[in-house]
Image (cartoon, rainbow, N blue to C red):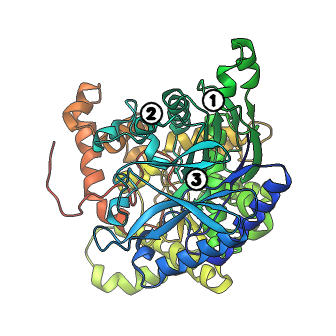
Amino acid sequence: MRIGLAQINTIVGDLSGNRQGILDAYATLVRQGAEIVIFPELVVCGYPPRDLLFRKRFLADVADATNALAAAMGDVPALLGFAEANVSGIGRSAYNSAAFCHRGKILHVARKCLLPTYDVFDEDRYFEPATEPSFVEFGGLRLGITICEDLWAHDLVETRRLYDLDPVKQLASAKLDLLLNLSASPWHLDKNKLRRTLVSDAAKTCRCPVAYCNSVGGNDELIFEGRSVVSDANGQLIAGLAAFREELRVVTVPLAKEISATTSTERMASTTPANHATYAQAELADVFDALVLGVRDYAHKTGFKQALLGLSGGIDSALVAVIAAEALGAENVIGVSLPSVISSQHSKDDAAALAQRLGIRLHTLPIAEVVAAAEGTLAPLFAGRPRDTTEENIQARARGLLLMAISNKFNALLLTTGNKSELAVGYCTLYGDMCGGLAVISDVFKTQVYALSRWVNREREIIPLSTLSKPPSAELRPDQTDQDSLPPYDVLDALLKGYIEESLSRADLVARGFEATVVNDAVRKVDLNEYKRKQAAPGLKITSLAFGVGRRIPIVQKYVS
């Protein structure tokens, strides 16, 4: 069977734009010979719609859009993810559903069984679960339909214990010819291998091929990388689609009864993977592509054509500038150097060299007079008090003031440049360097920033080598370095990963070999600075647990472990 996979990028709530994208993809795949076309989860309205589902007209408008799409489908059936109103009067107001459309009609509706409610997911807030998965009979074939999480009640998945049913095992006795899965599965590091295993094992369990179609694109903090896959009945990969890119592809799938009739040699020949070049690319390439996609979609989907950032001459702003230039084009990126009286010449030189190599605009706005004016105004009130971090923060806030003014005047999206290590321990200034609309690398630890920057330079020097080699510094006082206030980043990042992403206690961290004084200081800083993170710009998620919607720690709390 020739299956058309429509790995497309949609915008949440853009029913008209999504409809056109769906129709265009359908027409293209039909021309390429598809016998069925599969779209991602909730493709009609975009994922995740969140509280748009509570708007009075939203579900009715989604129904109208879905019916209009069904009416446009011809001889080749299409499977569309949509939000379906629950008219029973019992339970949540909506279902997460899939419409099987053929010759102008919706012939069958399948509903999602497992509703993830953990990390960034809160589907139980909105959707009523189905009690069992369904299948549709078409053209003499029995096609099973599952939606995203329905594949995840698997022994390898920690969250499987949240569910008391397994849709894949329920379908195993249905004698399926093909299992279809519509997904909107957000990406994070190390997820693709697990997802691939789930698809493979679902094929073995149901003894039929599996076609998995995933969303691609950035929606707020979440990045969907695509990487749709098709597996044969033996669980062997037939095709892997592009990562972090749209792709429309027709994959010829040997059906279960055909597989059983072949020799083992023929089986192997039929499942030689046809993977896109990016399907199994290196981890750092994944991170870079994810951040580029996240910036591009956040900007374009919110109406920005230009991006703006402060170029300090440091490693973080350099990496963000490279990502922005790749995402939006160098001609659409504005760099601003904001030197103070303390700023070193090498930092100013590095900022200029980077801008030149990237081909982005660079403006230099010294902040000495702004800082002096603020300090002069405050002098009578501060009389007799020693200088401390207050004056250092005035510098950061002067920069934030100017950058926000430029953002307003030129309608440019201001990108913040703080990394996860800094945001974790509060090594950042509220209303200063935290000003902005998108925190590009807020889920990238400092050690990862260096690794990614070296990867950027793998073929030629883009980020100045001096930026990579000099000690990191905020340059808020003479001869300052980050390590005046923080442990070495390789130590700090490992500690923070354990505390934040693995939820380890202080005792656990000490047992891992970290010094107790270092652990106590770092953990105290993480906890004390929750209020800053609640006011930070949304950040792009690349790890299993990022600051943002997936991490809900109270600001006011006294728990000590």
In the foreground, 426 or 374: 426
- Residue 71: x percent and y percent? 68, 72
Is the residue under label 1 in contact with that under label 3 (CB below 8 Å)? no
Q: Foreground: 288 or 428?
A: 288
Q: Secondary structure at mark 2?
A: helix
Residue type at tag 2: Ser
**Residue tagged 1:** 256
At 47% from the left and 69% from the top, the residue drawn is 84
Q: Residue at x 25, y 57 (%)?
A: 528
Amino acid type at circle 3 is Phe
Dot 1 falls on a residue whose secondary structure is helix
Q: Residue at x 54, y 35 (%)?
A: 199
Q: CA distance from mark 3 to mark 2?
A: 32 Å
Reading the image, the residue beneath label 2 is 173
Neighbour tally class for label 1: few under 14, some 14-19, many 20 plus, Cα within 10 Å:
many
Tell me the crowding category of disc 2: few under 14, some 14 to 19, or many 20 or more residues within 10 angstroms, Cα based.
few
State which tag comes first along the sequence, 2 or 1.
2
Nearer the observer: mark 3 or 1; the answer is: 1
Q: Is residue 481 visible?
A: no
Q: Quadrant of residue 280?
A: top right
Residue 281 vs 235, above or below: the answer is below
Q: Earlier in the sequence, mark 3 or mark 1?
A: 3
Q: Mark 3 = which residue?
A: 224
Residue 219 placement, left or right of 87: right
Q: Quadrant of residue 80?
A: bottom right
Residue 384 at what x, y percent from top left?
A: 25, 75
Is residue 65 or residue 245 the one in the foreground?
A: 65
